[in-house]
Image (cartoon, coloured by chain):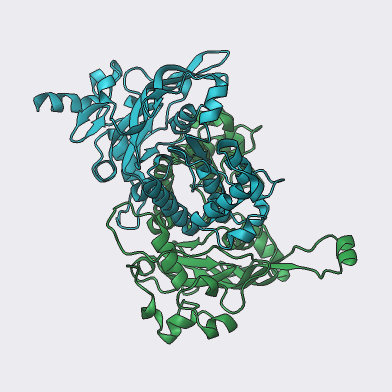
Amino acid sequence: MGQHIMSDAVISVRNLQVEFVTRRATLRAIDGVSFDIAKGEVLGVVGESGAGKSVTGAAIIGLIEPPGRISGGEILLNGRRIDNLPPDEMRKIRGRKVAMIFQDPLTSLNPLFRVGEQLIETIRTHLPMNERQARDRAIELLTEVGIPAPEKRIDGYPHEFSGGMRQRVVIALALCAEPDFIVADEPTTALDVSVQAQIISLIKKLGRERGMAVMLVTHDMGVIAETADRVAVMYAGRVAEIGPVRDVVQRPMHPYAKGLMGAIPTLEAATDRLVQIPGSMPRLSSIPRGCAFNPRCGEAFARCFVDQPVPLPVQGRHVACHLYETMEAVR
Amino acid sequence: MSPRPYVEVTDLRKVFDVSKPWLNRVIERSPKQFLKAVDGVSFDIKKGETFALVGESGSGKSTVAKMVVGLLGVSGGEVTIDGISMTDPAQRAQRARLRRKMQMIFQDPYASLNPRWRVDRIIAEPIRAFNVIEGEANIVARVGELLTLVGLHPDDGRKFPHEFSGGQRQRVAIARALASNADFIVCDEPTSALDVSVQAQILNLMRDLQEKFGLTYLFISHNLAVVRHMATRIGVMYLGRLVEVSDAKEMFSHPRHPYTRMLLDAVPDLAMSGRARIPVAGEIPNPINPPSGCTFHPRCPLANERCRAENPLPIKGVACHAVVEGRTLLIPVPA
């Protein structure tokens, strides 16, 4: 697999496995996930609840809590392995090199401290600056994320900010030490549509301008279509399809990706019925043998119930589906 | 179509008292504070149609829904369903008969089903409460029928809610809503807690049931794409006021109110058609202290002096001075 690592990849995830040990059984939440994210690139990760999107993000950032553990594969940051670092080492990287934006801006800020104090603390933890310099930098960051009158708002408490403004503060917090890589886990889910659009374009702009690699985790395909360069569709802890966003969104190949796109009501298409995928995502304790999607798939054949498909290159993307293996062999 | 609309809502108002406790008010010499959650909303729904209310959080759409079904008292205005007033105390007796005709489906199927009751008991509750069917055997048969109708198995009735996924629970909630042979169903964000593939299943099911039983829906959602898929007519709410009401098709092809246009532009573009979008500015203001005049004016690209001073009244379905005055063409096109 080593030859796949791109020279400009900031983050490389290779065959990642994450397990949760419970009394009854060991559950595999992530099963062989691989992808790269280049400098300045936004990788969208979509899937339904329980697909393993957030766990993948947490694994990269080193925030998998026991009983969960990374049980296989590796994660490389700028070519250096970070999945096996001792907690102290990882703590130095987290916030400095890799950062995270969480879903709920209310719970990711401390309500007892002024916004400025939280920014300054983070800046001074990672960068050699005095109080004065850190404060100036905090104001700079707040300006950059679009907070009006930052010199004044820096002394406000989180509850004095609206939802959208709070999420901007959280983004500023993630940018404090100019990380190379940011995981944004459902950054717009808690926000209203009009504010959502503002935050999406902000994340996109910052990624481009600063050359950061961004992993955008969301269940909202619209957000991905607007923001991401490439998209990975996850299902039951595995990547079903990964490729350029235009290809995957407009011409999905994996039956699950097809179903998912058809299920989304849009403003453009005037259809009476939405495509529906029968059934629901399997529980981790009962992932079917072979392809995890086989009970819900209309095109499943004998092999799908036996062999687990791996992502193979098809038409400029990677698809984990037996339907396309023969197709590529013919080529 | 009957000459009279099935549901008529006239000048509906709801004011919440959000004052500080009495002692604080006395010490701090602060006056009482009131929040106008719903401020003069009027619309009507014809039999068999789906009327959707859309808006951002805090716009008052759920408050309207609760007042329509009578879960919340009104501060002013009137709600009439099937010719019977929901608000007139004199019509209490008639109202009792109306109750079984309307049901509600809530947003969170994890909170709306009693976790200690088996599903068959949950679904049978309205049947028993309204004495729709006599005899235990008949009730059991009816529950089985309802479960089949919503795509579950009659044997699923013996299970508890926790044994179902979110989508299946919402199916149970729909079965319960149908149990009393209701013909008016208020759906408050019925799919926003669900994954997209499951959302598609539920939306399709709701449309099928509407066709089959001629149901009338009041559909509350913040998701314009979902609304477009479901609604015949749409009302857009902003800070407790209805800013635009029009046919669904018309609303999406020719949105008139600047707020409606802004909402439509904010929907992420799945087709990646690169359509021109007006950049969205600002956020919904604090409803305790709303802006003067038209409450949308601080965010509106068309606002002028009149908008800042005078609250626009709905004219031909739009409450906007700019639309009435024909100033709409001046919206700046982003480069």
Q: Residue at x 28, y 58 (%)?
A: B274
Q: Residue at x 60, y 54 (%)?
A: B100
Which image quadrant: the N terminus of chain A? top left
Residue A103 rendering spot, x and y as whole percentages: 53, 43
From this view, report whether residue A303 is shown above or below residue A103.
above
Res. B130 visible in picture: no
From this view, report whether residue A156 is shown above or below residue A177.
below
In which quadrant of the rendered view does residue B124 lie?
top right
From this view, report whether residue A93 is shown above or below residue B210.
above
A288 relative position to B19: left or right:
left
B131 relative position to A174: left or right:
right
From this view, report whether residue B275 is shown above or below residue A45.
below
Q: Colour of chain B?
A: green
Q: Residue at x 56, y 28 (%)?
A: B159
Q: Colour of chain A?
A: cyan
Q: Pick whichever, A83 or B14, lies toward us.
A: A83
A70 relative position to A132: left or right:
left
Res. A302 visible in picture: yes
In which quadrant of the rendered view does residue A79 lie?
top left
Residue B292 rendering spot, x and y as whole percentages: 62, 77
A242 relative position to B307: left or right:
left
Residue B330 rendering spot, x and y as whole percentages: 38, 79
